[in-house]
Image: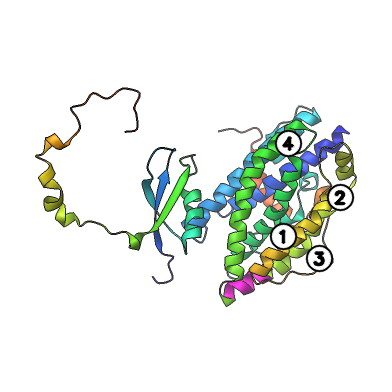
Amino acid sequence: MLDDKFDYLLRLGDNALVLSQRLSEWVGKGPALEEDMALANTALDLIGQARLWLAYACEVEGAGRTEDQLAFMRDAQEFKNLLLVEQPNSGSGDGGGGGYADTLMRQYLFDSWHLLLLDGLTRSADERMAGIAEKAKKEVTYHLRRSTDLLVRLGDGTEESHRRMQAALDDLWMYTGEMFTADEVDQVLESQGVAENVAALRLTWLEQVGRTLTAATLVMPSPDAWMQKGGKHGRHTEHMGFLLADMQFLQRAYPGQQW
Amino acid sequence: MSREWPLWEVFIRSQHGLAHKHVGSLHAPDGEMAINNARDVYTRRNEGVGIWVVKAGDIVSSSPGDKAPLFEPSNSKVYRHPTFFPMPEEVKNL
């Protein structure tokens, strides 16, 4: 039972941690100072959320591990984040001109789901989780506001920006199915009243995303298209190892190093 | 330079009861994004409860060259300053 909650907390924490790492890769390289800082702010919000979830995961596990050890000393197959958040900033949809479209589309698809999930968690029977969700929800409400705004601007922008956003959407769509597939961990936590059924978020999400994509003049791929899965169970895409190598190098080379 | 976003001046109200204060400028394509950008660039350390953004080009400014005729005449008129009244300590933001 506790293992299920530990696993669920890892999923929440790893989503935030891995996406934060991806966004941090933009620091100092954003297309404008204002965008650079906005992405860094989002990354900082997410790292804060990751710390809260992972610190709680450590307590639930009761094995004396710390949040830092979870972040820096686990290998890819022990990470339980969605495949979506580990996708690189520059996918094939960028037309060779830098991956900002991928970054923004990934952010929008995640934010829109993340907010629905956190909203459900604020009603969790686990008060600690409800409290973390309450705090995170405020931050993510802004993340979604910003990513929605940029999605509509760039989708309904120039021919070039429209083409890039559509390509990014088509590329990332197959990673969205996993957000709504409930497994035994989800079912156990639902039966305990700790988390809502993630599959039940799907219709609301599709409707919201459909409205935003229409406003952005983008074409939503079929919701019944073939979807990737595996992240929640530690089966990741080839990008995950490189991301961890970047993120974990220091603690791997100099274990326990502090500054 | 026409590809650059226009410049906006940012004013933040740090707490209720205080006036908005100029904090700096930024670039954004329109007002809505200027507000978002101002939030991200200028309120990271819990500075504000309200934001104004104004297109820099829409601000009408006095000319530095006019300093003498505009401001110097009031220098010699100390009786215009309300400094002869004792203020209660509790009144802070007056």
* Precedes in sequence: disc 3 or disc 4: 4
Disc assigned to residue A182: 2
- Chain that bears disc 3: A
* Precedes in sequence: disc 2 or disc 4: 4
- Chain that bears disc 2: A
Amino acid found under the numbered disc labelled 3: Pro
* Precedes in sequence: disc 1 or disc 4: 4
Provide the major secondary structure of the magenta segment: helix
Of the residues tagged 2 and 4, which is closer to the observer?
Answer: 4
* Precedes in sequence: disc 1 or disc 3: 1
User: In the rendered image, which residue does mark 4 sit on?
Assistant: A130
A67 relative to A120, above or below: above
Q: Residue at x 27, y 25 (%)?
A: B87
Membership of A163 in magenta stretch? yes
Of the residues tagged 1 and 4, which is closer to the observer?
Answer: 1
Secondary structure of the residue carrying numbered label 2:
loop
Region rendered in magenta: A160-166
Q: Are marks 2 and 3 on the same chain?
A: yes
The answer to whether the residue labelled 1 contacts the one labelled 4, judged by CB atoms less than 8 Å apart, is no
Amino acid found under the numbered disc labelled 2: Ala
Amino acid found under the numbered disc labelled 1: Gln
The answer to whether the residue labelled 1 contacts the one labelled 2, judged by CB atoms less than 8 Å apart, is no
Query: Label 2 to label 4, Cα distance in Å?
Result: 20 Å
Visible residue check, residue A235? no
User: In the rendered image, which residue does mark 3 sit on?
Assistant: A223
Q: Residue at x 76, y 48 (%)?
A: A81
Of the residues tagged 1 and 3, which is closer to the observer?
Answer: 1
Secondary structure of the residue carrying numbered label 1:
helix
